[in-house]
Image (cartoon, helix red, strand yellow):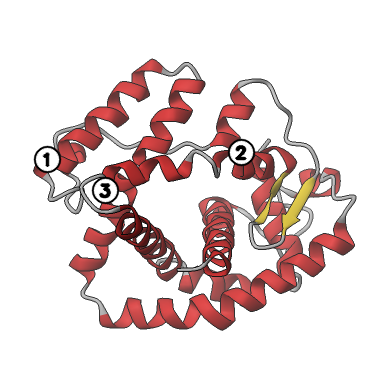
Amino acid sequence: MNVKHVTIAIMFLCFTGSLKAADSGSDDWDFDDPINDPMMEYEEKIDDPLEPFNRLMFKINNVLDKGILVPISMIYKHTIPEFLQIGISNFTSNFFSPIAVINFLLQGDGEHVAKTTLRFIINTALGFFGAIDVASKIGIEKKTTSMGDTLKKWGAKPGPYVVLPLMGPGSLRSSVGKIVEMPIDPLTQTLLFTYPKKTRKKLYWAIYGAKIISQRASLLSIMMEIEKTSEDVYAATRKAVMSMEK
């Protein structure tokens, strides 16, 4: 996989992450009633000084998403048995958990450093390298985090809304977090230490791609709903993303 494919894949992952944020609170919002919409006051305060640039990047990212990832995700969703989709999702999540450990460590969260490390060991050893989430079954629940969360823990404010080319939307804080976290990501290649270097890189990006496709496939219906119910998808996404980063 060449650099061009990798950078496009990164954008897809961040873009679908914003859709998760939109879905997490959409049931409580009434987008058709500005009086009863609890997000309206916050929407008016969103700092978006780069809106023309952001809208252009949003369109470009959306075209790439629909032109490449959506068709692949639809094939994946409708041809792969559900139990295998769950296994792939569990495996990729487990594979990249060392990044979460690093962020929990930087946040000074010793409890979740220990829990995430223990989850990784248990699921790798007993869950077919993470395909089965054994840790959750015995009561060790998963908690996700990112470099954006780390910067928030350190006192960084969200800042203005930004849509990065190939990396998707977020606050300035989370966008910086995405960039800072990129050098950390290849550390997970060490999990494939038994393979030659070239093979290790290919396997790493294959797993990364599987993670992106798995996440995007789970969000197909959500994206369709957002496009149907929102007159301005950019504004709806901005509202959802920034409401999660206060």
Provide the secondary structure element on which disc 2 rests. helix
**Quadrant of the image containing the N terminus:** bottom left
Amino acid tagged 2? Val
> Which residue lies under the disc numbered 3?
192
Lower sequence index among marks 3 and 2: 2
Counting from the top left corner in percent of width and height, residue 146 is at 51, 38
Residue ID at (85%, 62%) = 53
Lower sequence index among marks 3 and 1: 1
Amino acid tagged 1? Ala
- Compared across the picture, whether 69 is left or right of 43 comes to left
Residue ID at (24%, 36%) = 120
- 3D distance between C-alphas at marks 1 and 2: 30 Å
> Which residue lies under the disc numbered 1?
125
Please tell me the numbered disc located at residue 202.
none
- Compared across the picture, whether 130 is left or right of 177 comes to left
Provide the secondary structure element on which disc 1 rests. helix
Q: Residues within 10 Å of mark 2 (few under 14, many from 20)?
A: few
